[in-house]
Image (cartoon, grey):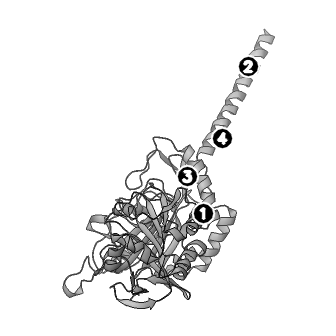
Amino acid sequence: MKKRSLLKIVGIVLAVIMTLFSAAGCDSKNSAQTQVITNLDEKVGNEAAAQDKERPGDEAGPEQGGAGEEEGRREAGDRELAANESNRSDDSGVSTGGGETGSGSRGGGEGDVKVIGGVAYKGYKGPVQGEVKYKEGTPAGENARSYKASGDIESPYKVDLIVTRDFGHQKMFARTVGLVRDEVGMEVMFRNLDIQTAYGGGFVNAINGLESGYTFFTGKDRKKLDWFYWVNGILAPVGIAEYRPQPGDVIWWDYHDWSVTMFIPAVIGSYPQPFKNGFWGKNPGTVVMYTPEYREEAGRLKQSLEAGGVRQVDTAPYDPEVLKAPKKYYILLGLWDELAAGSEIIRDINTRNKLVGVYVKFEGGELKALDFKGNTVSSHNRAGAVYAYGSSIGSLNPVWVVTGTDDEGLRLALHTLIDDPGALKEHFGAVVTKDGVINVPYLN
């Protein structure tokens, strides 16, 4: 009898121990699923802190800090992004405003963490669009308190957010910021910039107090000054309240006069975009097309693009026919006279220039750098140019042109693209001379 009682007691004890071990295993599994994930390792964190220390505060004026991540930081982000993607459940999602299907919150560490689809976002307070009503009217500064930036988040997903004015000549903001997977771009704006909307919330009317000169004005007070944005160097065909940024995107806003050029379909200042990420997650591939004497140089450009993370790059002899309806991203490499001789499109763009968002003109053996009204500001005998154009309004496959008045000029432009691409940052187009790189269009 005593033996049976003893065995019963031992059995109960073993059952309790097994239950405790099972619970501990579940806790460990759940803990792994909701671990705070960022792509800020110790080295990157120190670099980011140093950069923030160098940046002036918002009240001190326009930001002068660099835009974009260094390649090591991007590689770390890509590795963690791949790991996180494998953990995302198929039925997870985010609503139009950055909703929280399958989400949860927890405290701990340095701040609250919200988990959405198995991915943790530190400092994320939920979607703003639709939750906060923004007063629409002018002056934008009168209701500044209602649209203050809510603050950036820590996330495994990143985008570069750039804000400039006057065709990229003055930088206002440039940082790599956190992204919630599948949220709309307006959410990124609300967290990092002071935004005022118009037309019911889908139109960005003011950024950091600089407001449209057109929306809420009439008569002689109305001016054609507004905000425009590009994703990876491509003018977005949808509003930022509809566009869903992809990790690694470069979102660039610029405030400028549109009295002459209403739309500028493509800009070069986000290089190596769009060749690296494409647009809205779709990348048709890149082809470097060269005139006969620049075959070797085309190969060098291909190698440089691949080293910069571009995965689909080919080279091919120059074929003007494909420019009529481009299905890929094309980079044309050759002397301007030779490119123009075989293409009516290239000649037409040279003539229309400012009307289609191109601010260089080849004429009489010279390269002319233009202002935004199409006036010649400077002329150069031996110079190169890097510019982009869209085959049509709304086209997502821009054509880039790397060219020059002569061999020396072309090589100056190519050297800049391959060996000093940072010199093209936030440039709409570029004229390259032995004295440096000129951002075109000029201002009056």
Judging from the image, what secondary structure is the residue with disc 2 in? helix
Whole-angstrom CA distance, mark 2 to mark 4, is 26 Å
The extreme top residue here reads: 1
Q: Amino acid at mark 4?
A: Ser
Q: Nearer the viewer, mark 2 or mark 4?
A: 4
Whole-angstrom CA distance, mark 1 to mark 3, is 37 Å
Q: Which residue is mark 1?
A: 303
Return the disc, 1 or 3, that comes first in the chain's sequence: 3
The residue lying toward the viewer, choosing from 395 and 155, is 395
Can residue 196 be seen here?
no
Q: Amino acid at mark 2?
A: Gly
Check if mark 1's residue and mark 4's residue have beta carbons within 8 Å: no
Image quarter hosting the N terminus:
top right
Query: Residue at left 46%, top 89%?
Result: 380
Vertical relation: 250 (above or below) 20: below
Q: Which residue is mark 4?
A: 28
Residue 11: mark: 2
Return the disc, 1 or 4, that comes first in the chain's sequence: 4
Return the disc, 2 or 4, that comes first in the chain's sequence: 2
Density class for disc 4 (Cα within 10 Å; few <14, some 14-19, many ≥20) is few
Residue 289 position, x and y percent, is: 48, 64
Whole-angstrom CA distance, mark 1 to mark 4, is 46 Å
The residue lying toward the viewer, choosing from 327 and 424, is 327
Whole-angstrom CA distance, mark 2 to mark 3, is 41 Å
Check if mark 2's residue and mark 1's residue have beta carbons within 8 Å: no
Residue 120: mark: 3
Check if mark 2's residue and mark 3's residue have beta carbons within 8 Å: no
Check if mark 2's residue and mark 4's residue have beta carbons within 8 Å: no
Vertical relation: 11 (above or below) 250: above
Query: Residue at left 37%, top 72%?
Result: 346
Task: Specify whether 398 is left or right of 177.
Answer: left
Vertical relation: 309 (above or below) 341: above
